[in-house]
Amino acid sequence: MMDAFKISRRRFLTGSAVTAAGLSLTGCFDAAGDPKGSVRGVLETANSLTYRVQRLLLSSDSLAKEFSESEIRQDARANGTVDPQDADYRRLAANGFADWRLAVTGLVEQPLSLSLAELRAMPSRTQITRHDCVEGWSCIAKWTGVPLAFVLDQARVRSNARFAVFTCMDSYGGGFTAPVKYYESIDLVDARHAQTILAHGCNGETLAVANGAPLRVRVERQLGYKMAKYIAGIELTDSLDRFGGGKGGYWEDNGYDWFAGI
Ligand SMILES: Nc1nc2c(c(=O)[nH]1)N[C@H]1C(S)=C(S)[C@@H](COP(=O)(O)O)O[C@H]1N2
Ligand SMILES: [Mo]
């Protein structure tokens, strides 16, 4: 019943209907970069279909596969931004992130400002999972962090919140256009999922800059670009309109799917 409610909200959000079954998401994502292209329309339809199929067929708490230590194959694989040059980030990194704070704001009863030490002192979960990038590679790594649900409970999320938006410290672009900060968003089903953690460790070490230090999210049932690195804030909201281009994430604003379930 809860799922049906969420799905109808999503239908309201996208305004698109399921018109065909069996659409696949294996198409070329580069073509989706053309905002007027037909591929993107198909992807948007497939996106809402995937979202509904997943939310209907899988229970909302089904777990992504976890692996054993011997299966770890990370090879220090890093992607997207790997060394932010943004001045605010460089300043925080130079000081070992001692002055960094995670701001939890928006539709919460208790806004939070958390230091890395405070996050490290919270309950932690370690999981060995596979990371799948939309570019076609994957790797298996061990992630350690605070369950996002725990942090949300400290902040006491208001009942009208629908999404968690992650604001990041790295930016894209520049040159002809003003730099745009990376951001991402997930719904509260994924935000409260048992394997969704705010990771501060990887493969038994402190999270490296290349992988998103000091804090990055792991959303294990979604593609890599959903897993925001270099997080500075989490805002609870009932609408994605106010953020970036309004599609829920940096890559979504450039044509990728908002729901990247795998
Ligand atoms: N802030 C930020 N988060 C990001 C990205 C980015 O460029 N900036 N890239 C995304 C993409 S496309 C992938 S595949 C993963 C890569 O995570 P990794 O560097 O730990 O492998 O981070 C995601 N999160
Ligand atoms: Mo990616």
Image: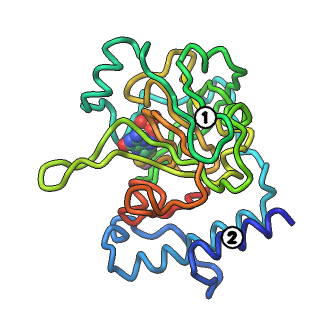
Residue 30 locus on image (x, y percent): 34, 65
The three-letter amino acid code for the residue at tag 1 is Pro
Instruction: Please report whichever mark, 2 or 1, sits nearer to the chain's N-terminal start.
Output: 2
Q: Amino acid at mark 2?
A: Arg
* Residue 61 left/right relative to 165: right
Query: At 60% across and 27% down in the image, what residue appears?
Result: 142
Q: Which mark, residue 9?
A: 2
Q: Is residue 258 left or right of residue 126?
A: left
**Dot 1: element:** loop
Residue positioned 71% across, 52% down in the render: 189
Q: From what the image shows, is residue 16 above or below residue 216?
A: below
Q: Quadrant of residue 3?
A: bottom right
Residue visible at 56% across and 70% down in the picture: 47
Q: Nearer the viewer, residue 174 or 152?
A: 152
Residue at x 40%, y 68% (from the top left corner): 28
As rendered, which of 133 and 247 lies closer to the eye? 247
Q: Is residue 50 above or below residue 240?
A: below
* Marking on residue 262: none
| Circle nearer the viewer, 2 or 1 | 1
Q: Which residue is mark 1?
A: 111
Q: Quadrant of the C terminus?
A: bottom right
Q: Position of residue 214 (x, y in %)?
A: 46, 24
